[in-house]
Amino acid sequence: MATTPPVSPIPHSIVTHSSTSKPPPTLSFSHSPPFRPQFPQKTLRRDFLKGVALLPLLHDLKTPSSSVAREVEVGSYLPPSTSDPSFVVFKASSKDTPALRAGNVEPYQFILPPTWKQQRVANILSGNYCQPKCAEPWVEVKFEDEKQGKVQIVASPLIRLTNKPNATIEDIGSPEKLIASLGPFVTGNTLDPDELLESSIEKLGDQTYYKYVLETPFALTGSHNLAKATAKGNTVVLFVASASDKQWQSSEKTLKAMLDSFQV
């Protein structure tokens, strides 16, 4: 019985040639490189640099900041203090933080050395997500110098401390009562009553301020902390200056000058 020859996997159009025959050209469309238009080298370089320039803007769109922090020394853009030209003055305005734009915080100001730099405030700490009705304290702005320390403004809703609307800081209670409530926002973790070295009351016009000197060996912010607080409108505003032992040795006087200058 005749058998059916096996089917060859090779197409009939492809045959074996002898050594004297010239094989047909091979067309490999599947492996051909894709068409790439050619652009002048200068155009490619220019477009690349434009893309690099846009990266910080795209990053800001993804992670909005509560303040326009500048990675440059503040002395390059802030005016000198009229009372002491060795410092510059930071005056917060509505463009600086979400709470100022929402009207939840009154404008504040303080002096700082011209070599300090403003730091970005993480969105989760800035109160950006909860304005205009935040239930917990948030960080307004912060500045830092590696050799001298750091400062930050913390704002707390008044309702968290008292049910009385538009209360003064005296309505909330004594300096010791206030720092007991806001202490963790000074230290970054906890505050022991024994860590409070000094407390005082200061009057600037119609505004009353509570001032504190704290020695906080276990604080996340630093082993030395200074604080100054006042209440205005619907918010308690707290100025905090922090330093390590090494920073404190050389910058104690500077940090205290910054603390004294703070006002709302």
Image (spheres, helix red, strand yellow):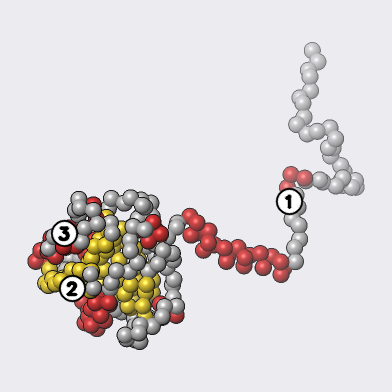
Q: Quadrant of the C terminus?
A: bottom left
Amino acid carrying label 2: it is: Glu
Mark 2 crowdedness (10 Å alpha carbons): few <14, some 14-19, many ≥20: some
Is any part of residue 34 visible from this angle? yes
Mark 3 crowdedness (10 Å alpha carbons): few <14, some 14-19, many ≥20: few
Sequence-earlier tag: 3 or 2:
3
**In the rendering, at what x and y percent does residue 143 appear?**
34, 71
Answer above or below: position of 130 versus 40.
above
Answer above or below: position of 181 versus 208.
above
- Mark 3 in CB contact with mark 2 (< 8 angstroms): no
Q: Nearer the viewer, residue 69 or 211?
A: 211
In the image, 77: left or right of 210?
right
- Mark 1 in CB contact with mark 3 (< 8 angstroms): no
Q: Which residue is mark 3?
A: 171
The residues tagged by marks 3 and 2 sit, at their Cα atoms, a distance apart of 15 Å
The residues tagged by marks 1 and 3 sit, at their Cα atoms, a distance apart of 75 Å
Q: Nearer the viewer, residue 251 or 247?
A: 251
Amino acid carrying label 1: it is: Pro
Q: Which residue is mark 2?
A: 202
**In the rendering, at what x and y percent does residue 57 appear?**
53, 62
In the image, 15: left or right of 49?
right
Q: Which residue is mark 1?
A: 34
Kindly identify the residue that appears in the image at 45 percent across and 57 percent down.
Answer: 63
Q: Nearer the viewer, mark 1 or mark 3?
A: 3
Q: Nearer the viewer, mark 1 or mark 2?
A: 2
Q: Quadrant of the N terminus?
A: top right
Kindly identify the residue that appears in the image at 17 percent across and 65 percent down.
Answer: 218
